[in-house]
Amino acid sequence: MEPSSVVDEPKPQTGGRAPQSQSPPQPPPDSEARYQRRGEFLSNPRTKWGLILAGLVIVVAVFFLWRYLSSYESTDDAQIDGHVNAVSARVSGHVIKLNVEDNQYVEKGTVLVEIDPADYEVAVEKARAEYADAQAQASAAGINVPITDVSTSSQVSGAQGGVSGAQAGIEAARQQFDAAKAQIAQADANNTKAQNDLLRYKQLIDKQEISEMQYDQAVDSAHAAAAALQAARSNADSYAAQIKQAQSKLEQANADLRTAGNRTHTMRVIQARAESAQAIADQKKAELNQAELNLQYTKVIAPVSGAVSNRTVEVGQNVQPGQVMMMIIPLDEANIWVTANFKETQLSKMKPGQAAEISVDATGKTYKGHVDSVAGASGERFSLLPPENATGNYVKVVQRIPMKIVFDAGEIKGHELRPGMSVVPKVWIK
């Protein structure tokens, strides 16, 4: 502190005299000089303009600071995200070889695990033999189709010829039978005339009006006419029998034609058998393909390029289909992105396509990217027990909406980023 002078208090005078008046205290010399300098500083025009200029600078700085702070939205509730590809066994068996270790980077198609293939090689040979047998049977059944077609066609043609022949035989027999009946009529007339002549000759011979020779001729003529009549009747009976025989042949030919008429059904049966044999061959082919696939599955390959993580399989272990053996994490920029959980109050001016800067805590670097998309619901909706605001006491809580931010091409050098790393993204909204 600056030194200050002390004024001695006046001593009271004796004799009843009143005390003399005192003069006011004077400011110290240094304080007075300071007040004078301050007055001169404030009264100086340069000071006023300087203060005005400083105020303008502060206002402009505050304006640009406010504009900068309002030009982006940021959150520290964000992390690197990516795909996690589970590698599982597709067939069962014992692991005989393990080709990768934890955290090893592998390319797509690399053989990761080998399962004992002996059982599957036997299954392939068995399936191949069964397929060859089924294929041979299908080939034989297919050959029967044209053979049966030709055979049934010949049977139809033969049956039709038999029907025509039988009908012609019936017609010829009927004509001959008609001719035989005409002959019977003629023979009967001749026989009647001969018998009548014999009776007349009998009367004449009794009266001795004709000779014995004439009578014998009449007797012979009567016998001959009777024999001719008998022969004509026998001939007619023969032709009648031929008609019945021809009718029997016609019935047999019609039966054969009806049997041959089932050619369509027969062909359908043969074709169905051929198709069935071919279907069995196709089934055996599918079983062979499956056996070959199972043999290929004994070598578990990497579905994508990435880093091996969380390996749980060991040599000698018996694995089952669907058993997860390890994880592969793709680390290229196409499979790495940022999941930022912004407050819902920050989303009013945010939209896909806006530029973003991503500060990664692990590397200390800042990467460029852009907003890809916004999730369809808040994070709470994906939780195990989502909130039920319609029950109990309701307290409004600002929700967070996941947003996907992708890196721009060429921003990530190498495999320096890992899913789960903490980041601070800035999304430029202006």
Image: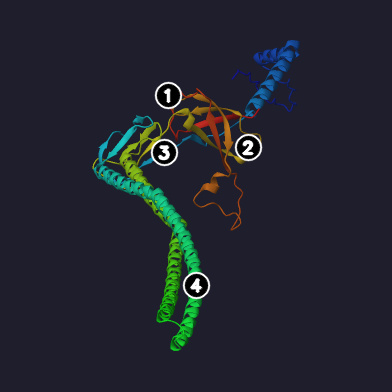
Give how far across and how far down residue 34 sits, in percent.
67, 14
Q: Amino acid at mark 2?
A: Leu
Q: Earlier in the sequence, mark 4 or mark 3?
A: 3
Could you tell me which secondary element the residue under label 4 belongs to? helix
For image coordinates 60% across by 56% down, the residue present is: 393
- Indicate the quadrant containing the C terminus: top left, top right, bottom left or bottom right: top right
The residue at which mark 1 appears reads as: 414
Q: Is residue 91 left or right of residue 16?
A: left
- Asked if the residue under mark 3 is in contact with the one under mark 4, i.e. CB atoms within 8 Å, the reply is no
Could you tell me which secondary element the residue under label 2 belongs to? loop
20 versus 257 height, above or below:
above
- Asked if the residue under mark 3 is in contact with the one under mark 2, i.e. CB atoms within 8 Å, the reply is no
The residue at which mark 2 appears reads as: 347
Q: Amino acid at mark 4?
A: Lys
Alpha-carbon distance for marks 1 and 2? 32 Å
The residue at which mark 3 appears reads as: 85
Q: Amino acid at mark 3?
A: Asn
Q: Nearer the viewer, mark 4 or mark 3?
A: 4
Give how far across and how far down residue 263 sits, in percent.
45, 57
Give how far across and how far down residue 98 sits, in percent.
27, 36
- Asked if the residue under mark 1 is in contact with the one under mark 3, i.e. CB atoms within 8 Å, the reply is no
The residue at which mark 4 appears reads as: 181
Q: Earlier in the sequence, mark 1 or mark 2?
A: 2
316 versus 275 height, above or below:
above
